[in-house]
Image: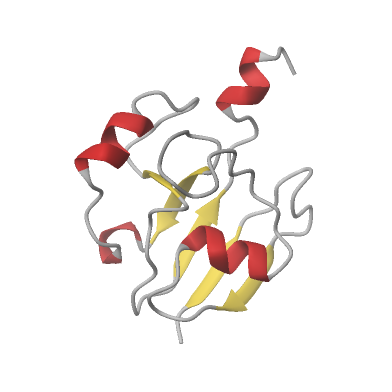
Amino acid sequence: MPKLIFLPHEELCPEGALFEAESGTTILDAALAHGIEIEHACEKSCACTTCHVHVREGFDSLPESSDEEDDMLDKAWGLDPDSRLSCQAVIQDEDLVVEIPKYTINMVSENH
């Protein structure tokens, strides 16, 4: 089983996290199953960007993003070339290093 390594995030996983995840599971579902409460305001329907993450290692092992995901990512705060919506990024057979951005678009728009 591939391993997911979450880099430390001040609020969601201050110590970071390392666990095995089932291939075919989304990054978001794996995180939630291990107590990492990544925001997902649209309930995983690819209609917002609150579950945006950076896949720092293993990005190329993920299936290509859909046009719908790419359109949503264009609205994400802190977008970079290794950005994905964690509700859409399906884990394959390679380990992943994931960074959760400090802010979501909701937090930025609410001046947090």
Query: Image height check: is 112 above or below 59?
Result: above
Left or right? Give the position of 67 relative to 41: left
Residue drawn at (67%, 23%) of the image: 107
Left or right? Give the position of 70 relative to 104: left
Left or right? Give the position of 87 relative to 89: right
Left or right? Give the position of 7 relative to 25: right
- The residue most toward the bottom is 1
Which of 79 and 67 lies nearest the eye of the viewer?
67
> Could you tell me residue 66's position as x and y percent?
23, 46
Query: Image height check: is 93 above or below 49?
Result: below
Q: How is the image coloured?
A: secondary structure
Which of 24 and 42 lies nearest the eye of the viewer?
42
> Could you tell me residue 63's position as x and y percent?
25, 61
> Could you tell me residue 32's position as x and y percent?
65, 62
Q: How many marks?
A: 0
> Could you tell me residue 6's position as x and y percent?
60, 60
Residue drawn at (37%, 64%) of the image: 90
Residue drawn at (79%, 52%) of the image: 14
Task: Classify the position of the C terminus by image quarter.
Answer: top right
Query: Image height check: is 67 above or below 16?
Result: above
Residue drawn at (40%, 23%) of the image: 75
Res 13 → quadrant? bottom right
Which of 15 and 22 lies nearest the eye of the viewer?
22
